[in-house]
Amino acid sequence: MPDPQSFYRPVDIGSLHLEGNLFLAPVAGYSDRAFRSVCRLGGADFAYTEMVSAEALVRGSDKTALITERAPGETSYAVQIFGGKSETVAEAARIVYERVKPELIDINAGCPVPKIIKSGAGSFLTKEPDKLYEVVKAAAQAVPIPVTVKIRSGWDAHNITWSEALDAACKAGAAAVTIHSRTRAQGYEGRADRNVIAAAVEQLNGKIPLFASGDVFTPEDARDIFTQTGCAGLMFARGAMGNPFIFRQTRDFLQTGSYTEIPFAERLEAAFGELELLCADKGEENACREMRKRFCAYIKGVEGGAVLRKAVVSAKSRRDYREIFAHLIVKTE
């Protein structure tokens, strides 16, 4: 068995050098500036924005601007783009690079949502490697920063196309590939297939880094995935929701063999920090509505959590949240 201490290490993605290999995944509706910021404080080595439409970027939609901006304290980050037309994706990549100067642009070839697939984007690109090649090549030629790709294992159990998609992405100039090892048909159900990750690592044979995504909920999960697959790094998605400290815990576990549970006081402080950042970006009303699901994640496993969740889903203001958690804030200070 490999030494777990060797699993946490620096990684190079094209010209981009990162000191660690534990990343926050691009999660629609979650990986905004506020959440990315608290995850960086929680030890994330790198983070991806939620996916942004290439078509919307090219049309000049105001709604896309905030999604692509760098978060507070974010020294390096990636913007993820989705689109099915190579020329549009290339133009969107140029717009993003010129506007916000991220360190990396990622192409979404894994989203299983029907409206994304109908546009020829997301998982459709994993299913159609030739199209994926065109999109990735166009983006890679459009900007002077690394372009990476996130794919799925395939369309469904009868159409497993990750190998062809991986080869296409690599030939098109991708600097790294992430595989979410479920099919489009699975969505987020069932178990991610770690054998796919291991086979992909073997296929690449060190040409570019291969990152794993899917079912990384604990530091132990991270160790097991590294052990079983030999991947270059991991992306945390649902595992970071309500616990932005999972990156620090995982790093400690890989380096020392142990980690500490996060006191609820620290989790609550992170939640309120995220709330303030979100209020600054989206306004109090929208932010407080958005934070309902996020506070529910933060209080998972807390004694009396059911009562707290019932109150949280009706919170409309900062004051509401402070009042809901007032007795716990007093106890933990």
Image (tube, rainbow, N blue to C red):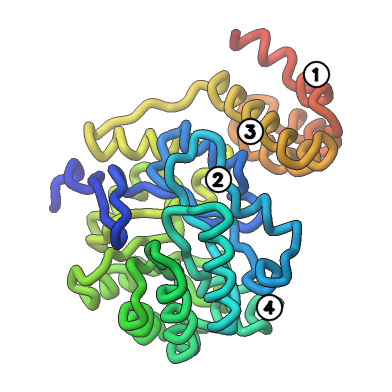
Residue 114's disc is: 4
User: Upstream in the sequence, badge 2 or badge 3?
Assistant: 2
Which residue: 47% across, 62% down?
Answer: 105
Question: Please, what secondary structure does the residue beneath circle 1 have?
Answer: helix
Question: Please, what secondary structure does the residue beneath circle 2 have?
Answer: loop
Give the residue type that dot 4 points to: Pro
Residue 193, image x and y in percent? 39, 69
Residue sitting farthest toward the front = 98
Give the residue type that dot 1 points to: Glu
Q: Is residue 9 at least partly visible in the picture?
A: yes
**CA distance separating discs 4 and 3:** 30 Å
Q: Is the C-beta separation of discs 4 and 1 under 8 Å?
A: no
Please tell me how crowded label 3 is: few (under 14), some (14-19), or many (20+) other residues with Cα within 10 Å: many
Residue 218, image x and y in percent? 41, 44
User: Upstream in the sequence, badge 4 or badge 1?
Assistant: 4
User: Upstream in the sequence, badge 2 or badge 1?
Assistant: 2
Residue 323's disc is: 1
